[in-house]
Amino acid sequence: MINVAVLGAGRIGHVHAANVAGHCDAVLAVVADPFIENAQKLTAAYGGRAISDPLEAIADPTIDAVVIGTPTDTHVSLMLAAAQAGKAVLCEKPVDLDIQKAREAQRVLGERASRVMLGFNRRFDPGFSEIHQRLRAGEIGELHQLLITSRDPGLAPMNYLKHSGGIFRDMAIHDFDLARWILGEEPVEVFASGSRLFAPELEALGDYDTVMVQLRTASGKQCQINCSRQAVYGYDQRIEAFGAGGMLLNDNQRETSVRRYGAQETEVRGPLLNFFMQRYTDAYRLEMAAFIRAVKQGGDVPVNIHDGCAALALADAAQLSADTRQVVQLN
Amino acid sequence: MINVAVLGAGRIGHVHAANVAGHCDAVLAVVADPFIENAQKLTAAYGGRAISDPLEAIADPTIDAVVIGTPTDTHVSLMLAAAQAGKAVLCEKPVDLDIQKAREAQRVLGERASRVMLGFNRRFDPGFSEIHQRLRAGEIGELHQLLITSRDPGLAPMNYLKHSGGIFRDMAIHDFDLARWILGEEPVEVFASGSRLFAPELEALGDYDTVMVQLRTASGKQCQINCSRQAVYGYDQRIEAFGAGGMLLNDNQRETSVRRYGAQETEVRGPLLNFFMQRYTDAYRLEMAAFIRAVKQGGDVPVNIHDGCAALALADAAQLSADTRQVVQLN
Amino acid sequence: MINVAVLGAGRIGHVHAANVAGHCDAVLAVVADPFIENAQKLTAAYGGRAISDPLEAIADPTIDAVVIGTPTDTHVSLMLAAAQAGKAVLCEKPVDLDIQKAREAQRVLGERASRVMLGFNRRFDPGFSEIHQRLRAGEIGELHQLLITSRDPGLAPMNYLKHSGGIFRDMAIHDFDLARWILGEEPVEVFASGSRLFAPELEALGDYDTVMVQLRTASGKQCQINCSRQAVYGYDQRIEAFGAGGMLLNDNQRETSVRRYGAQETEVRGPLLNFFMQRYTDAYRLEMAAFIRAVKQGGDVPVNIHDGCAALALADAAQLSADTRQVVQLN
Amino acid sequence: MINVAVLGAGRIGHVHAANVAGHCDAVLAVVADPFIENAQKLTAAYGGRAISDPLEAIADPTIDAVVIGTPTDTHVSLMLAAAQAGKAVLCEKPVDLDIQKAREAQRVLGERASRVMLGFNRRFDPGFSEIHQRLRAGEIGELHQLLITSRDPGLAPMNYLKHSGGIFRDMAIHDFDLARWILGEEPVEVFASGSRLFAPELEALGDYDTVMVQLRTASGKQCQINCSRQAVYGYDQRIEAFGAGGMLLNDNQRETSVRRYGAQETEVRGPLLNFFMQRYTDAYRLEMAAFIRAVKQGGDVPVNIHDGCAALALADAAQLSADTRQVVQLN
């Protein structure tokens, strides 16, 4: 059995703790959070010891793997400490909001980077990963264009947004990772547009509520991403992969399969899975399973800090592009 | 060019007159209606002479084909007169409400029956006829079960219902014809249930507002039909053909291909084509084209009085079954 | 915690054992099966003791609840023994293949019947139960017609079919229960047609491969059920509830949300959830949760032996109707 | 009645001639084409005189309106001649491939521009125009993002492509017009990427087979367009309008409403309407109706040469952007 410590007992720590506890090869051994009550709530539900100091968990020789779900600015130091202590690591995205700091962490990790997994959960979504797999299997031939729609159901509180790093680094970073992964090539060109169409208060943060991004790889593959901080109809998460031999689409998921035909309208389908933890329940579970499998088998993790840095670099480029209204070339 | 006389300038006469006028091989030569103003409206729009006496049109030697859209109780006499005058005939369903009278007409027609077409327009609906054709082509192997949903958008006025012959002879007769045609075999067993769930005033007529019918052919093919006089969401017309090698479905048609995602619901599709003349616009046009083609080429019409009598016999059996709560065997 | 004994370690015992083990208020204490190796496989995976004699589990005073997943002909005796021993019971359908024996069991149980749940898992399917709940909430007004499509992906082995009781008692019994539950009234009239369209070997068993059933309640509500032992495209499980104010539909569930557009066709959706244990995974889990909740709170179980007898009576009536080609009236 | 002359008896001239002939307020008086046999084919089918010289038609005082479907490089001279002769004009897109020449034509036309309609047929597509109308009616509040997918079913012959002006001016020009019309504001920023992913022979023409374009208006509305010269699954024409209060989508249209469930797959829908003349049959008919209405009522045409120049300017900007990999600002 793999002994796992979960650092951070917030919303995402809760998701990870439950998935560890539900996995047949893993045990939730420790939950660490400075707010010890939060840690205790999780251990009461899913087992393990509650402690307040994450470094104590990292120092514990019985711990095999560490899951980092703490605030972003602690990711790098905890990741480095855990890796140095010989633990396998699953760290929430982003590595850091500062690309220099993220790249320095990558450099310091060296060969240990292959044991530090980044939490890009969407790669484990059944629909998205099926498209990736069927593409690789050649089902629609060479990929030509990729379309990603990624809209949140509602604007997060200003307090959250203030420390989020902006819509590109906080939200679109998932889409940049998906784009790299599905395109199978690095984007070399980024153009982004940012608007404030309903949240003028974002101007003070230099942030946007509505963005579009266009990417191109060296071989000419193309990708368009559209994001909004607020889709009133729910969490809109779709991709379309268009290739020489056809197209693969993954549509939104709904709470219910029941449809209504009524006097005012035909037909009405139910609401979208509305929150990222509902929509990506399976993705988080399968992400944890992939992590535990890598820990158990001693191989490389399937998404690592290199991916974390690459997605962050795209987010930075998009921010620069939107701010300057210029294309950004990468190399 | 085929010279066509349309008898009856009501709702259905209007449909036929327009389709004759729009056909490149036919000319609308005459419209006959005792209410001459109605006939004149049609000839003003689509050409031809307006007259009041249908027999005058039948007697006119320049007329090649006669379309009968008059009240049901005049169908037989006009059909016989026109056939006897050597005209090709397209007669609206039903032949008559009285099966004896219908069969007598069939007997009198003799060989001329092959030139008397019955207006079972749904056979010419693109979706239904495609299912028929793909079934015959073997796409889903041997047919096992057929499901027909047939619901009107709203209850017709009592004045109409009083002379309609009841829900089986007036409305489900289309479904009986579809069933015979798609099954490709004669039903030998009929069981029907009739209810008055929202229109108690139908009791006085011995009629029902809601019915279900189950048919079986000699070889064991099965069919279920469900009808209602009132579907608040519109005109619900669907069929499902289930066979050894798969299933073919034809869903409802909508006014618009636009879908809305809104704050209260996702997603909302537009209303169904709501009235039989909208829903079956193509069917009526293609029915007329098939009639004119048969007239021009001198061959048999694709649906004839034999089909009209057979569907009426099923309607009679269903009425008897619902009234007596017994199965009716046919031979 | 509720201590649960699972009797029978076959396919369905496996499903129940896993759901007991995964429930936070229950413990899998015992698995009993004459083939002790089967019982041991389950206890190895989900905990508890493996024994060979189900009566030993029933006699165990530490056991609160008994789940019966043994062969049908043992249901009644085990159910009565367990109930008499004061246990709550969840028994797989059917109560028995013999309605007399089932009714006798019901009589013997007396007041204890309220603690004996029947395993009509489809009532707990999220889509079906949502339709039931929205109907009861008045969303489409008074119910007029109910359509149930229920087709297996492939013919079961003859060895199974021989002891199954026939398509009505084995397979359609789920649909009869659904019909009673959703109609909210007892059917008083049953008409069924049975055919052997692809499995002539069923003649020796007096069984059918393809059936249709039509039901009517005293107030005139109507229901049509269609069943086949073999739908090549997968496990086809749909219902449509049509009422005065609209319609509620529950469509099939698919393995994947990915759709393909290719050179030969647009668009192609993935296969249906193909096996009852996949399709009704949630239903079985929620059924067990409902049972455990009833045990814990001491209230009545949500589906009981009365429902089991009523569904069996409908199956018997359908068999009689199909065999004699007569309507069967119930009272 | 409006007397119409159709100039050019090619593919698009045929469409227009048929729509003129089918309109109750118009008469096809003349078809002019240097290949007189082509003109004669049309007049044989739809009436009117066939002549070889378009200027003869323009000089004919009995002609009220002129439809220009000749090669692109003759559009400006014929349009100016017809307008000067006092005719109403419907001219196929583009005005010209040279924006200077197009703007000069606009200048010369002066006030007569309001009687010169440009053939941006997609504005008259029922689905697209419904989205435009519902947006204007406020159904989804302020528009934030617009997505346009526009893919041809297959690469046109090199001979056509050589004189087409390139993918932006030939194909995407429709999407630029749609974007301007639906956004309701002028784009001020254009970024385009062009690739040759399957047709390397386009390099000699400086043309691309696969392009993506991103637009922004002064108020910050955003638009993404994706085009391909070859979608193996058919003619892919979709738009999504996303706003503060929801989203409106128009999906592709299919040849048939029949769906198949088979052993290898569920479910399979039929092919897309595959050719622009099938897909936009209604659009062309409604475009002609709008033109004839404007001619009859003497008002302004609904799309004019100003729109033609503006769309061409966007196409030029996209070409420049793709060629230079720079953003292009417009003013």
Image: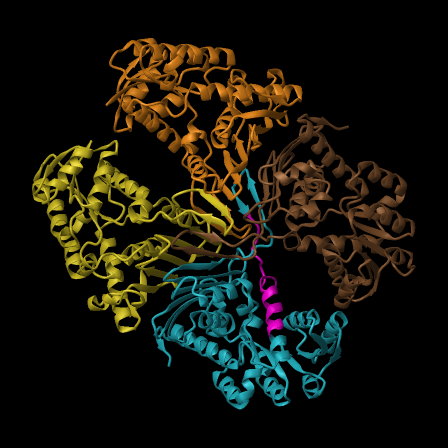
Chain colours: A orange, B cyan, C yellow, D brown
Quarter of the figure with residue B190: bottom left
**Magenta-drawn stretch, dominant element (helix, strand or loop):** helix
Residue A328 location (% of width, % of height):
62, 21
The answer to whether B112 appears left or right of D35 in the picture is left
Q: Is residue C4 visible to the viewer in this orientation of the structure?
A: no
- Residue in the image at 44% along x and 63% along y: B197
Residue B236 location (% of width, % of height):
51, 60
Quarter of the figure with residue A75: top left
Say which quadrant the C terminus of chain B sits in.
bottom left
Vertical placement of residue A218 versus C269, above or below: above
- Residue in the image at 60% along x and 27% along y: A211
Q: Is residue C136 magenta?
A: no
The answer to whether B187 appears left or right of C288 in the picture is right
Q: Is residue B278 magenta?
A: yes
What residue range appears in magenta? B269-290
The answer to whether B64 appears left or right of A76 in the picture is right
Q: Nearer the viewer, residue D96 or C85?
A: D96
The answer to whether B29 appears left or right of B296 in the picture is right
